[in-house]
């Protein structure tokens, strides 16, 4: 993933109220005792006093989701191991997106006409629904257009993000709907950071994919074809895999193999910054589900993509 090439515009701070009617605004609140919305679903204060949703399954797995950016920052399996990674330079003050976990890239992946990776990762999402299904907590977040988003991308939209936590899996469903009266096009991704030992990490399932390798020159990626059965991270890696399969297998080099299944995320991205982030590059890899080619939605149309992370 290329570094930021342009400054990120941030929303103008606004005063919001906290309403206990099954909808929780993503703005930080002055004081909030833990609020339980459903069994295994709790809204509480996280880093920087930012609100986060904590999901806890009956079997002891746990996930944290910050409403700022709608970002899942932690996924712990019952043995307590966190399989996601948040960079040590991450800040929780809304001055920039949260660096780590599963950030959203929408309505733009990478650099382009608007800020790097779009605006969904530095806007406040809201909790609109929660439930517990057979001891598995489920929460749905929502993001809608507002003056901040329309100042750079003048379209009406709704994004719904459903997260389901089970004993050994974490699944997400992203639904983008055109709620306006004119068509729009977008690209998107889940910029997924996995805790790893970079020298031992590897990904299976990409052999035969067409590749766009940004390693030599990010502005002029080299087209190619993946010939390896097992893709590793020997140095700087920034490569797009087009028409990727719907299941990959990540060996994180720490004793875990993670299955990454998806529907409708047509592409994949591998990234590790190597010496560009000397303090932490050895401790994570990014294996991202993405929709690189733009998707057009007519008024009223929706696009849905799912991801299922599970321990094998």
Image (cartoon, rainbow, N blue to C red):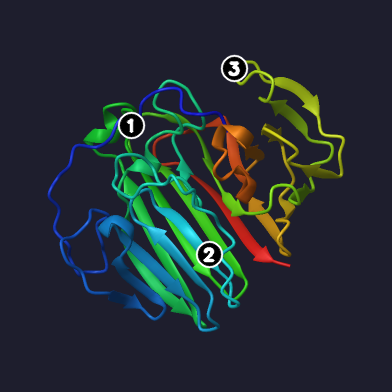
- Whether 64 is drawn above or below 274: the answer is below
Q: Where is residue 3? Give x, y as percent.
A: 51, 29
Residue toward you, 242 or 51: 51
Do the numbered discs 1 and 3 sit on residues whose CB atoms are within 8 Å? Answer: no
In this rendering, would 155 be left or right of 190?
Answer: left
User: Which is closer to the viewer, label 1 or label 3?
Assistant: 3
Q: Residue at x 79, y 42 (%)?
A: 231
- Whether 152 is drawn above or below 172: the answer is above
Residue toward you, 120 or 32: 32
In the picture of the structure, the residue carrying the numbered disc 3 is 219
Q: Residue at x 51, y 67 (%)?
A: 164
Q: Quadrant of the N terminus?
A: top right
Which numbered disc flags the more N-terminal residue, 1 or 2? 2
In the picture of the structure, the residue carrying the numbered disc 2 is 75
Q: Where is residue 252? Give x, y as percent.
A: 70, 56
Residue 155's disc is 1
- Whether 294 is drawn above or below 15: the answer is above
């Amino acid at each position: 993933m290329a570094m930021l090439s342009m400054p990120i515009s941030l929303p103008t701070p606004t005063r919001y109220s906290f309403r206990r009617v099954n909808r929780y605004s993503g703005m930080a609140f002055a004081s909030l005792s833990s609020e339980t919305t459903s069994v295994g679903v709790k809204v509480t204060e996280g880093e920087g006093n930012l609100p986060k949703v904590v999901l806890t399954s009956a079997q002891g797995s746990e996930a944290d989701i910050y409403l700022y950016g709608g970002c899942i920052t932690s996924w712990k399996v019952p043995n307590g191991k966190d399989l996601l990674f948040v960079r040590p330079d991450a800040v929780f003050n809304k001055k920039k997106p949260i660096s780590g976990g599963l950030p959203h890239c929408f309505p733009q992946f990478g650099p382009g006409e608007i800020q790097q990776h779009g605006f969904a990762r530095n806007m406040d999402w809201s909790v609109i629904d929660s439930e517990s299904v057979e001891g598995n907590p489920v929460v749905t977040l929502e993001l809608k257009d507002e003056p901040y988003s329309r100042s750079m991308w003048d379209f009406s939209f709704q994004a719904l993000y459903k997260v389901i936590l089970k004993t050994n899996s974490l699944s997400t469903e992203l639904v983008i709907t055109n709620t306006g009266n004119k068509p729009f096009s977008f690209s998107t991704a889940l910029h997924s950071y996995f805790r790893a030992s970079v020298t031992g990490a590897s990904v299976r399932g990409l052999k035969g994919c067409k590749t766009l390798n940004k390693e030599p020159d990010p502005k002029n990626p080299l087209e190619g074809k993946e010939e390896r059965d097992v893709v590793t991270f020997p140095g700087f890696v920034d490569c797009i895999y087009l028409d990727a399969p719907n299941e990959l297998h990540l060996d994180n080099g720490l004793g875990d193999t993670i299955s990454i299944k998806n529907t409708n995320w047509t592409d994949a991205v591998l990234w590790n910054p190597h010496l560009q982030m000397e303090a932490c590059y050895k401790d994570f890899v990014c294996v991202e589900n993405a929709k690189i080619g733009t998707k057009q939605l007519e008024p009223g149309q929706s696009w849905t993509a799912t991801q299922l992370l599970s321990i094998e």
